[in-house]
Image (cartoon, rainbow, N blue to C red):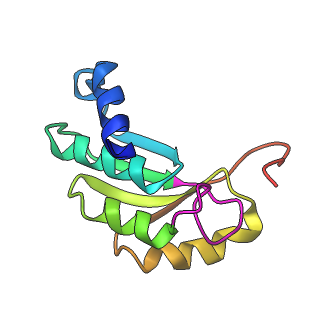
């Protein structure tokens, strides 16, 4: 069984019915790897009628925290019609500009950045 199948099944098993909550937008934040990105994108396509954004984090300024390519992750979620923006969160500020350029290689969708407030200790 692939990792993305395990993720999708565990999310489904937990009864994730976000569309029943009345939210206008879903935020999938700090997605750690391409398997979870794929699983969540597939869940959106399988019948959740709410737009979403995805954000990833990076500790090296190049890849997501798992080591997966940020460009590849952006391309995966870019293919989902319900994704309205892709971005970065929980990442040292010195990496943000470069990571935005990396995301732009995988999508034409709007880019978002969620900055940490307060003491910055992600390094």
Residue plotted at (49% across, 53% down): 33
Q: Image point 29% across, 30% down: which residue?
A: 9
Q: Position of residue 99 (x, y in %)?
A: 59, 72
Does residue 123 sit above or below 36 in this rendering?
below
Would you say residue 98 sits in the magenta stretch? no
Q: Residue 100: where, in percent of width, then height?
A: 55, 73
In this rendered view, identify the residue nearer to me: 6 or 42. Answer: 6
Instruction: Judge from the rendering whether residue 86 lies leftward or rightward of residue 115; answer left or right.
Output: left
Question: What residue lies at 23% left-to-right and 43% top-to-bottom?
Answer: 44
Which is the main secondary structure of the residues drawn in magenta? loop
Residue 77's x, y, as percent? 33, 59
Segment colored magenta: 56-68
The residue shown at (42%, 42%) is 27
Quadrant location of the N terminus in the rendered image: top left
Can residue 110 be spotted in the picture? no
Residue 64 point in image, percent of width and height: 57, 60
Kindly indicate the quadrant of the structure image that contains residue 50.
Answer: top left
Is 7 situated above or below 75?
Answer: above
Residue 58 included in the magenta stretch of the image? yes
- Looking at the rendered image, the quarter that the C terminus falls into is bottom right
């Amino acid at each position: 069984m692939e990792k993305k199948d395990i993720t999708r099944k565990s999310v489904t098993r937990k009864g994730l019915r976000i569309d029943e909550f009345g939210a206008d937008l879903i935020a999938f934040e700090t997605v750690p790897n391409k398997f979870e990105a794929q699983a969540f994108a597939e869940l959106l396509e399988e019948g959740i009628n709410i737009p979403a954004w995805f954000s990833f984090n990076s500790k090296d300024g190049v890849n997501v925290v798992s080591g997966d390519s940020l460009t590849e992750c952006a391309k995966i979620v870019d293919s989902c019609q319900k994704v309205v923006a892709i971005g970065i969160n929980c990442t040292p500020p010195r990496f943000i500009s470069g990571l935005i350029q990396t995301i732009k290689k995988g999508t034409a969708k709007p880019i978002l950045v969620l900055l940490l407030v307060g003491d910055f200790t992600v390094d």
